């Protein structure tokens, strides 16, 4: 999201996103694809728009991404340095398309854990191509643990990530391998075989996995393992869109995004730890006849995925 157009309020997609978020009225919200700036001005401008819409978020946390961070290398091998694909994560500038948390509950910012600096080659069983520079980070955008302080005094830990799409590469399948390993990171974190302590329950793994477990391109093993992990539960949030995708094997009601040449895919996940009680779950994707469908379509190809959790 561009700061100036948010302030002006003249970008239809941004203003539709404001309406969608306001209608959703979530207590805690993870945003992906929002630009990062050091002073958090873009996120503050979005929150100001939401407050005008009657849904203020007093607590917010922009999460510094790897997008646009220069490597000084020609990672795509085209002989040109400093292009978006040569950065740690694709980005035309530092911070393009990052992540952020908006919350009505306090964020324990002193205990946030940032895993975004973890080297790809240090992941156990990494699929990193052998010619990848040793300095390559695993996270395309980022991986974070963000504790939310609950009214009962406990913390709910958001394990947030935004993975690379498994396409836009060559026969080496660099992006497909990286996408797989960005989900595999959480498997290893839960197993305790990384240089970080496993998260203490309750927690939720959530974000844009950029990989459908049934349809589309990509290596499915890691995302399938997450969806079926013994420490997690998959509430299988469903939409009411009544869509059909001929030729696809996955349940279209589980899709979270619509791609013109591909169809619907489930590329967002929200997986609470096993100890949590889920009362409802869904994908905000109504039939086209619904009054809110137009705003959702204008805001993004991605649709909000939500959970209601019991205390």
Image: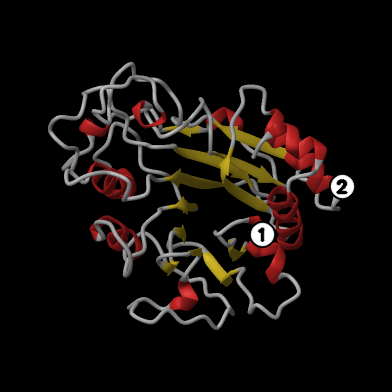
Locate the N terminus and report the quarter of the image it occupies: top right
Q: Secondary structure at mark 2?
A: helix
Question: In the shown orientation, is residue 1 left or right of residue 173?
Answer: right
Question: In the shown orientation, is residue 104 left or right of residue 305?
Answer: right
- Between 205 and 148, the one lying in front of the other is 205
Q: Is residue 9 among what the camera can see?
A: yes
Q: Secondary structure at mark 1?
A: helix
Q: Is residue 272 among what the camera can see?
A: no
Question: In the shown orientation, is residue 278 left or right of residue 2?
Answer: left
Dot 1, how many residues are within 10 Å of its Cα: few (below 14), some (14-19), or many (20+)? some
Quadrant hosting residue 303: bottom right
Q: Is residue 173 above or below residue 288?
A: above
Q: What is the x, y in percent for residue 76?
A: 27, 31
- Between 226 and 272, the one lying in front of the other is 226
Q: What is the x, y in percent for residue 71?
A: 34, 20
- Between 86 and 210, the one lying in front of the other is 86
Q: Is residue 264 above or below residue 27?
A: below
Q: What is the x, y in percent for residue 67?
A: 45, 31
Locate the C terminus and report the quarter of the image it occupies: bottom right
Q: What is the x, y in percent for residue 139?
A: 37, 36
**Seen from this angle, which residue lies furthest front?**
79
Q: For residue 298, which numbered disc appears in the image?
A: 1
Instruction: Please name the residue shown 68% across and 71% down the image.
Output: 293
Instruction: Please name the residue shown 68% across and 52% down the image.
Output: 13
Q: Which of the two marks, 2 or 1, is nearer to us in this view?
A: 1
Sequence-first tag of 2 and 1: 2
Q: Is residue 38 above or below residue 120?
A: above
**Seen from this angle, which residue lies furthest top?**
72
Residue at the disc numbered 2: 52
């Amino acid at each position: 999201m561009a700061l100036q157009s948010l302030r002006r309020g003249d970008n239809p997609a941004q203003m539709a996103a404001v309406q969608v978020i306001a209608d959703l009225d979530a207590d805690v919200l993870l945003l992906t694809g929002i630009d990062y700036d050091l002073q958090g001005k873009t996120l503050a401008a979005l929150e100001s728009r939401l407050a005008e819409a009657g849904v203020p978020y007093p607590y917010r946390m922009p999460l510094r991404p790897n997008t646009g961070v220069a490597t000084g290398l020609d990672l795509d091998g085209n002989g040109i340095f400093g292009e978006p694909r040569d950065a740690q994560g694709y980005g035309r500038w530092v911070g393009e398309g990052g992540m952020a948390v908006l919350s009505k509950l306090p964020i324990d910012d002193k205990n946030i854990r940032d895993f975004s600096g973890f080297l790809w080659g240090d992941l156990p069983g990494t699929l990193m191509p052998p010619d990848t520079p040793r300095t390559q980070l695993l996270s395309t955008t980022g991986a974070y643990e963000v504790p939310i302080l609950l009214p009962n005094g406990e913390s709910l830990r958001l394990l947030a990530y935004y993975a690379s799409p498994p396409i836009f590469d060559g026969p080496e399948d660099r992006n497909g391998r990286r996408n797989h390993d960005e989900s595999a990171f959480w498997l290893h974190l839960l197993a305790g075989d990384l240089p970080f302590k496993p998260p203490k329950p309750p927690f939720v793994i959530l974000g844009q996995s950029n990989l459908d477990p049934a349809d589309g391109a990509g290596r499915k093993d890691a995302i399938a393992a997450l969806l079926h992990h013994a420490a997690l539960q998959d509430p299988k949030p469903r939409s009411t869109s009544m869509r059909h995708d001929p030729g696809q094997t996955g349940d279209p009601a589980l899709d979270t995004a619509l791609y013109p040449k591909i169809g619907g895919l489930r590329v967002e996940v929200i997986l609470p730890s096993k100890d949590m009680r889920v009362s409802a779950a869904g994908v905000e994707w109504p039939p086209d006849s619904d009054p809110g469908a137009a705003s959702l379509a204008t805001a993004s190809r991605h649709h909000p995925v939500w959970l209601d959790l019991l205390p």
